[in-house]
Image (cartoon, helix red, strand yellow):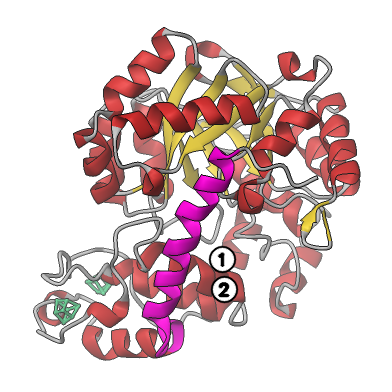
């Protein structure tokens, strides 16, 4: 295992263990198997474990606490997150952190993140005193480093990054998402500020590792070096020097072995021109499946009715690139629906036409947004948002009660 530098030069394993897709049995975490995998990952050198209140409906944090009992906790770093949607006061922040410490059976969280913040949730948290909360928690040793995870656009990412003395940040990044969300531009911006980046969704929800279109597997099969699609993805990300850790939601011993083997020699800037060309060819193949030729330039923004036009188009294109995958729809619901990010879905378009004149690609934006709305939202979208919003604080409350699912 290679180790990269986190905040204060701490050595973090290049691959981190994401605890949101643990093995399951009858809808619950398969505790025996999941513990076996966590222990195996530690033996293989992984020292960064990432969890959060909503993962496994509140069961992930208490599970990780149990899995690291018996002294293992001292060998690893624990990352977890403040669920901003459950926070209405400064007292809530303190109470949630106390419960998380109890859930995780520890006296400190090594890496504490504000979970999936966006411009509006960051503004809300600031008003409630989150900066003091993070500083105070660090001062008294309850957290060691603070950061945030993020799924919004590039501009808000830079604004949030510039607005506090963050020690690290966590971004979605993979070769398909290089230009969406904060993307490569955001990663380079963080790198220039000396802020280590943790990467999430390296396989775009697993889609880049399985059920690939045949024309894509053909490219990998004809590459000069033989690698699995997952290995190609991890190596491409680890090629960037700004990246400290790539999180992987591993749920088998084989995946742990494959990923840790990759991380044992994937140095920054190690990929050859020939290897990078393979990824470019795959990207190109996916790009051919794109429905709307939006480049993400943002000349059409801001929309007076708060539609995030480029992100709506990116989500729609992703949905079609990956054979109408359900995960893409769920991500759209969470992010564009305003559950995890600012509310900015295509159906909010009032057809005022302001954006249309600004688009250098000549896209009929209101017309395309209507298609996005029809396919990604449908008539029950607002009900789905309501239900998801209802579920999120419930999960937080369950975690607050320290529910054990054993
Ligand atoms: S046409 Fe729709 S997306 Fe474009 S600016 Fe008006 S409301 Fe916003
Ligand atoms: S102006 Fe056109 S190409 Fe640029 S982000 Fe908007 S829709 Fe996309």
Figure check: 269 above or below 47: below
Is residue 166 among what the camera can see?
Answer: yes
Q: Residue at x 66, y 66 (%)?
A: 207
Q: Quadrant of the N terminus?
A: top right
Residue 318 forms part of the magenta stretch:
no
> Can you identify the residue that label 1 sits on?
283
Q: Is residue 188 above or below residue 302?
A: above
Which is more toward the observer, 391 or 211?
391
* Residue 264, visible in the rendered structure: no
Residue 286's mark? 2
Q: Residue furthest top?
A: 140
In the rendered view, does 146 fall on the left or right side of 267? left
Instruction: Give the x, y percent position of residue 137.
Output: 41, 17
| 171 left or right, relative to 359 | right
Residue nearer the viewer, 198 or 361: 198
What is the residue that sits farthest to the front in this orientation? 401
Q: How packed is label 2: few (under 14 Cα within 10 Å), some, or many (20 or more)? A: some
Magenta region: 375-401
Q: Position of residue 47 (x, y in %)?
A: 71, 24
Q: Secondary structure at mark 2?
A: helix
Q: Quadrant of the C terminus?
A: top right
Q: Point out which mark residue 156 bears.
A: none
Q: Residues within 10 Å of mark 1 (few under 14, many from 20)?
A: some
């Amino acid at each position: 295992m290679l180790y990269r530098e986190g905040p204060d030069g701490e050595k973090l394993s290049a691959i981190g263990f994401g605890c949101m897709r643990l093995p399951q049995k009858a809808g619950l975490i398969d505790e025996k198997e999941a513990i076996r995998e966590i222990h195996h990952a530690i033996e293989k050198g992984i020292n960064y474990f990432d969890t959060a209140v909503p993962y496994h409906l509140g069961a992930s944090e208490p599970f990780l606490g149990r899995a690291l009992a018996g002294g293992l906790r001292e060998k690893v770093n624990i990352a977890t997150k403040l669920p901003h949607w459950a926070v209405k006061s400064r007292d809530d922040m303190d109470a949630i952190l106390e419960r998380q410490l109890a859930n995780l059976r520890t006296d400190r969280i090594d890496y504490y993140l504000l979970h999936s913040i966006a411009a509006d949730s960051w503004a809300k948290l600031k008003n409630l005193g989150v900066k003091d909360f993070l500083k105070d928690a660090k001062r008294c040793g309850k957290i060691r480093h603070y950061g945030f995870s993020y799924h919004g656009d590039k501009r808000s990412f830079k604004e949030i990054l510039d607005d506090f003395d963050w020690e690290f940040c966590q971004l979605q990044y993979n070769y398909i998402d290089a230009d969406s969300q904060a993307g490569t531009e955001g990663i380079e911006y963080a790198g220039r500020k000396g802020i280590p980046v943790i990467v999430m969704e390296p396989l775009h929800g697993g889609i880049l590792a399985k059920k690939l279109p045949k024309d894509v597997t053909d490219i990998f099969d004809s590459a000069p070096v033989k690698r699995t699609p997952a290995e190609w993805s991890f190596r491409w990300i680890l090629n960037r020097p700004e990246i400290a850790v790539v999180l992987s939601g591993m749920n088998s011993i084989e995946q742990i072995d494959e990923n840790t083997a990759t991380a044992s020699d994937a140095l920054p800037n190690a990929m050859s021109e020939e290897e990078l060309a393979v990824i470019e060819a795959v990207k190109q193949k996916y790009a051919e499946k794109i429905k709307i030729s939006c480049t993400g330039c943002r000349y059409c923004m801001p929309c007076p009715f708060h539609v995030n036009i480029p992100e709506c188009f990116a989500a729609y294109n992703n949905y079609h690139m990956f054979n109408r995958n359900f995960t893409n729809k769920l991500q759209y619901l969470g992010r564009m629906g305003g559950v995890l990010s600012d509310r900015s879905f295509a159906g909010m378009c009032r057809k005022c036409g302001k954006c249309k004149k600004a688009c250098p690609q000549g896209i009929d934006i209101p017309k395309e947004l209507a298609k996005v709305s029809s396919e990604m939202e449908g008539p029950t979208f607002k009900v789905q948002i309501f239900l998801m919003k209802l579920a999120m604080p419930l999960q937080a409350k369950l975690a607050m009660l320290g529910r054990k699912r054993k």
